[in-house]
Image (cartoon, rainbow, N blue to C red):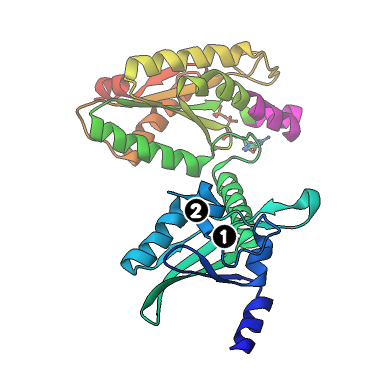
Amino acid sequence: MQLFERALSVLQSGVMILDEEYRVHFINHWLNKAFDTSEDLQGKVLFEHYPELVDFRIHQAVMQALKSGLPSLLSPGLNRSPLPLFRGQGARRERFSQSIRVQPMLSDGKRFCLIEVQDVSSMVRREALLNKQAEKLNQMALTDELTGIANRRHFNMMLERELRRSELQGTPLSLVFFDIDFFKQYNDHLGHQAGDKCLVAVSDYLRTQLQSYGYQVARYGGEEFCIILPGQAVDVAEHLAERCRKEIEELQLKHPSSNVAPVVTASFGVASKSDKQPETQTGLILRADNALYRAKLAGRNQVVVAERQDKESP
Ligand SMILES: Nc1nc2c(ncn2[C@@H]2O[C@H](COP(=O)(O)OP(=O)(O)OP(=O)(O)O)[C@@H](O)[C@H]2O)c(=O)[nH]1
């Protein structure tokens, strides 16, 4: 028996036994030291010494073990630090995260409750770090590296979600695709770095002017961008595309080799899903992209709406 008590006293985790009056029948050295008291807790009534614990999870778990004979596990996810236990010295002293197992015991016909405590601070910290890293990686996988706006993968996810919402709620949904005019010439004339800066400037415009209205913007690839307008019908989308077309021109980014204007311009395609007809993601993208292609063919720096074009086509 002495050997067991000695073993428990050198253990780097806590063990405590309470009797039916919540009196500490046994506490090992590690646990007594971790409590914020210089007193020996053996023989003391735990919840008289720490009345602030009454009615909290640890109190309920102990009552459950002693009255109903049921065990409990208090994991750090739900109960970060149920007992006032500390680690470290001086300014570095901190209440640590705990994993606590409360187990009912019977001895000589009397009920006891065994409380095992583990310091899981390092594990909790490691988990928080891993979560943060995973979130960062996730963010990177969905963001376009050059412009910082959503990339094509993210766009596909957003569009799928909005299409589903539109089906469920019976609301319209619109999509605007646009592409910078004569961008190859822009790169050839002013250099690839200037081309990159132009893409960043257009993306910054999209982020600052449109995202705050709840529209979702993304770089679809190369010099092609897209805007998702949840809940908006074709008229609003056409109006927004026209506004974007005008404001991109007003950015006054010099484009000496463009055949349309002395500044950077873009061509726009608009497609909408009405609140009645079902639509697939590919179908909507294809219609917006076709409308954009028609805007290019018709002379660039303009907006073409798929619905109207579709009706006008033989
Ligand atoms: N600087 C830069 N250029 C890019 C990037 N991605 C694609 N491009 C360039 O964008 C150009 C697109 O050229 P095209 O598809 O021929 O289109 P365009 O010259 O804009 O002609 P239209 O669309 O018909 O007006 C190509 O020269 C690509 O190299 C990028 O990240 N940075």
Residue tagged by mark 2? 79
Q: In terms of depth relative to the viewer, which is nearer, 79 or 208?
A: 79
* Residue 267 percent coordinates (x, y): 50, 22
Please say whether residue 14 is visible from this viewpoint.
yes
Tell me the element at label 1.
Answer: strand
Q: Which amino acid does label 2 sit on?
A: Asn
Q: Residues within 10 Å of mark 1 (few under 14, many from 20)?
A: many
Q: In terms of depth relative to the viewer, which is nearer, 22 or 177?
A: 22
Q: Quadrant of residue 163?
A: top left
Instruction: Report the magenta stretch's main SS.
Output: helix
Name the mark on residue 98.
1
In the image, taking residue 239 as reference, residue 218 lies left or right, namely right
Residue 161 to residue 259: above or below: below
Q: Distance between the residues labelled 2 and 1?
A: 8 Å
Magenta residues? 184-201
Q: What residue type is labelled 1?
A: Gln
Identity of the residue drawn at 56% across and 62% down: 44
* Residue 72 percent coordinates (x, y): 41, 64
Residue 219 to residue 310: above or below: below
